[in-house]
Image (cartoon, coloured by chain):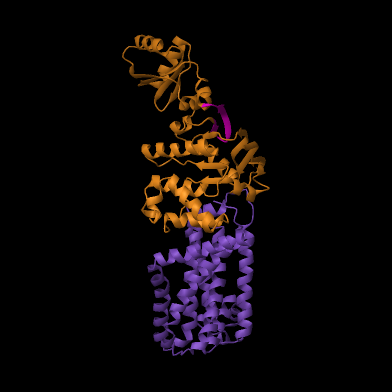
Chain colours: A orange, B purple
Amino acid sequence: MIEVKNLTHRYGDRVALSNVSFEVKKGEIFGLLGPNGGGKSTLFRILSTMMVPASGAAVIAGHDVEREPAAVRRSVGVVFQTQSLDKALTVEENLRAQGHLHGLSGADLRDRMERAMERLGLADRRKDLVETLSGGLRRRVEIAKALLHRPQVLLMDEASSGLDPAARRDLSRHVESLRENDGVTILLTTHILEEAGRCDRLILLHQGSIVAHGTPAELRARIGGDVVVLEVADTQAMAAAIEQRFHVHPSVMDGQLRVEIKDGHRFITEVVEAFPGSIDSVGLHKPTLEDVFVHETGASIA
Amino acid sequence: MRSFFLPAATLWQRELVRFWRQKSRVLGVVASPLVFWLLIGYGSNDLGRFYSGALVLTVMFSAIFSTISIIEDRREGFLLSMLVSPAPRTSMVLGKILGSATLAWIQGLIFLAFAPLAGVSIHPLDLIPIAAAIFLISFTLTGLGFVIAWRMESTAGFHAIMNLLLVPMWMVSGSLFPMATAHGVIRAIMWINPLTYSITLLNGLLGLPNANPGAFVSTIVTAAFGLVLLLISGFMATQKSTKSAA
């Protein structure tokens, strides 16, 4: 449904995307995970036809984003990170204007607006000015708006950022139902691990390149074993001491030592006994997507 | 056809609805040229001479404030969804310009209500050509605002252009002094300044002095200027770019 081939983009001298290729199948929920400045937004802008790539190509629903932007725009619904609603208009007025932009009108448009508001639980807020709505509700209006023309593909840019956990769960429920009931293909960008974990497949973007791709489970499996996090006073000295004694390579991140190791529980007892008094706290967890990102790039997502 | 006019119409309507919901904007736009005009007019004991200029200033302020919203709309707002919709860009440009021009026109008409103070009495039948002329001027100045605002990234830059280009352009348009008595260089600038012809057009229709070169030439120049700006706007908005549209 989405095919990206060797996409490269520069802003002046700065390389924002470097030779990025991937494919999204019909009905997938596909995630782009990475820190701000990693290339997600650039990729999003190219796919949503807001700019053309410096080189490479992207094809959505059979249409090239550079050569057939109008056809792409008809097949794609876009949910922006910054809001694309007119705050001085009501929910209904925003939806109607969007319908008109897509050439919809009359009974057909009214019918679509009803369904979209019904589906996203906005029916009783239809006469409210957007500026009076909460962040979660506004995001739902954005989605209702993006779905009016019944797109095959939904592109969502950091759609859950700035939402509280309840609104975020609510949002992901709507996204899931779109895929289940309508077979909509969804591509979303995120830097929120929880959201990325719910995708069918994802790519990790760092400094404009794909550093890893696969299902969340596949990605986590890249780290064989557990992750042990140690808080110590002198991270450099301790890292060297652990490396010498246990033949593992701890990474230093945000004043902590991270060690990827099999049988982490055993390592914990050994390391605490080996350096009595010099470890302030110890933690063990199964690998998260954040760990995968650190593992691949040496940098953290946030 | 429908997919061209429907987006334009909806954008036009949007401008009007937004304006209606922020009625205080009217006060801001009409008040400063009005105060300005009354001060200079009474100060020089000649309200009539500055009337057309003040009316054009009202229209200009309104047109500029409406088009400045493009910059905010682009950053976080409605423009984003327009840009990724299949509606033709030219239809968006037309809708935006017509909408903003209509607002400028309404505010110009409000200013027209003060004409009796300038000693101008308007025959009801003359209202039609006068209103039409004010619309033409509104359309032209909105087009100018659009061309300036489209590629601009911050409203701060717009204010600089306002002070360095638009206000001086207004000052040498015959709004403050007539072309006939101006210094040679300034007279040449006035002659090529399209805004000069907006002033002469209004002076002519309102029966005020300094109406040369007459209604016909003034209308043609103003309309031609507006048309050129509309074409430039349409051209700019349909350019594909490797820089982001938003």
Residue B127 point in image, percent of width and height: 50, 84
Identify the residue at horizontal 40%, vertical 17% (top origin): A238
Residue B12 point in image, percent of width and height: 52, 65
Position of B28 relative to A107 (above/below) = below
Viewer-side residue, A168 vs B79 = A168
Residue A61 in the figure: left or right of residue B112 = right
Q: Is residue A222 magenta?
A: no
Q: Is residue B23 left or right of residue B205?
A: left
Q: Main secondary structure of the magenta part?
A: strand
Depth check: A60 or B227 in front?
Answer: A60
Task: Identify which residue, B205 or A11, lies in the foreground.
Answer: B205
User: Residue B123: x, y in percent?
Assistant: 49, 90
Q: Residue at x 63, y 39 (%)?
A: A8
Find residue A59 and report its image quarter: top right
Is A212 one of the magenta-colored residues? yes
- In this picture, residue A244 sits left or right of residue B5: left
Query: Where does the magenta region start and end?
Result: A202-215
- Of residues B7 and A165, the one drawn nearer to the viewer in this rendering: B7
Which residue is pictured at 42% across the width and 71% down the height?
A: B29
Quadrant location of the C terminus of chain A? top left
Q: Say above or below: A291 vs B22.
A: above
Is residue B159 visible in the rendered structure shown here?
no
The N terminus of chain A appears in which quarter of the rendering? Answer: top right
